[in-house]
Every structure is written in structure tokens, then in C-alpha cells.
Amino acid sequence: MTKKPLVVTNEDLAGKIDALAATVSGLPGTIAKSIEDLAGMTQRGFTEVGERFDRVEGRLDRVETRLEGVEDGLKKVKTEVSHLGFIVTELVRRDEFLELKQRVQVLESQLAKK
């Protein structure tokens, strides 16, 4: 099998060159369009991230407010517990009370006899 030689005419080359020139001349517009599309996608991405960040920041503000309320409540509980501790130390135990009650009754009965 013998290969046929490739025959290319000037007209064939001119047609190919014209087609290639048309493709190349459209590239700047295509590249510019691609860059614009990329810039738009990037801007939308930043906008979405900014919106999500704003929502997260709002949620954190609400959590911080709730935490401040919890801290205030805890301070009140600590104060009340401290106050109760003071009251408890000032109270007489039941067995001490009963003993003192009995002693008072004995004294009252002795005074009543006199």
C-alpha cells in the first residue's frame, strides 16, 4: 500500500487561515465574557458569605445576651445561697430547741410553785 502525497493548495491554506483568524478574533470577547462571568460568580460568593456571616453574628449576639442573663441569674442565686447560709448558722438545731424548751418548762414549773 502506497501513501498518497498530501496536496494542499494555496486556496486551502487561505481558507484555513481565514477560519483560524475568525476564531482568534473572537477570543478577546470570549475571554472578556469569561472574566465577567467569573467576577460575577466571585461577587455572588462574597455576598452569600457576607449574608451568612451576618446571620451567624446575629445568632452570637442573641447567645451572648442569653449568657449575660444566665450570669446575672447565677449571681442572684449565689447571693441567696450565701444569705441562706447566714440564716442557717443563726438557727438553733431542733435537738437544742427541744432541750431548751424542756429547761424552760422546768423553770416555769418551779416558778409557778413559788
Image (tube, rainbow, N blue to C red):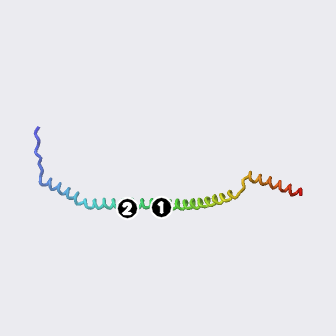
Please name the residue that numbered disc 2 is placed on.
43
Along the line of sight, which residue is nearer the eye, 62 or 106? 106
Q: Position of residue 12 (x, y in %)?
A: 15, 53
**Residue 57, disc:** 1
**Residue 110, disc:** none
Along the line of sight, which residue is nearer the eye, 90 or 22? 90
Along the line of sight, which residue is nearer the eye, 20 or 75? 75
Taking the spot 41% from the left edge, 61% from the top edge, the residue there is: 47
State the SS at label 1. Answer: helix
Identify whether 75 is placed above or below 94.
Answer: below
Three-letter code, disc 1:
Glu
Which numbered mark, 1 or 2, is in the foreground of this view? 1
Q: Quadrant of residue 40?
A: bottom left
State the SS at label 2. Answer: helix
Q: CA distance from mark 1 to mark 2?
A: 21 Å
| Residue 14 appears left or right of 113 | left
Taking the spot 10% from the left edge, 45% from the top edge, the residue there is: 5
Taking the spot 12% from the left edge, 47% from the top edge, the residue there is: 6
Taking the spot 31% from the left edge, 60% from the top edge, the residue there is: 35
Three-letter code, disc 2:
Gln
Identify whether 2 is placed above or below 61.
Answer: above
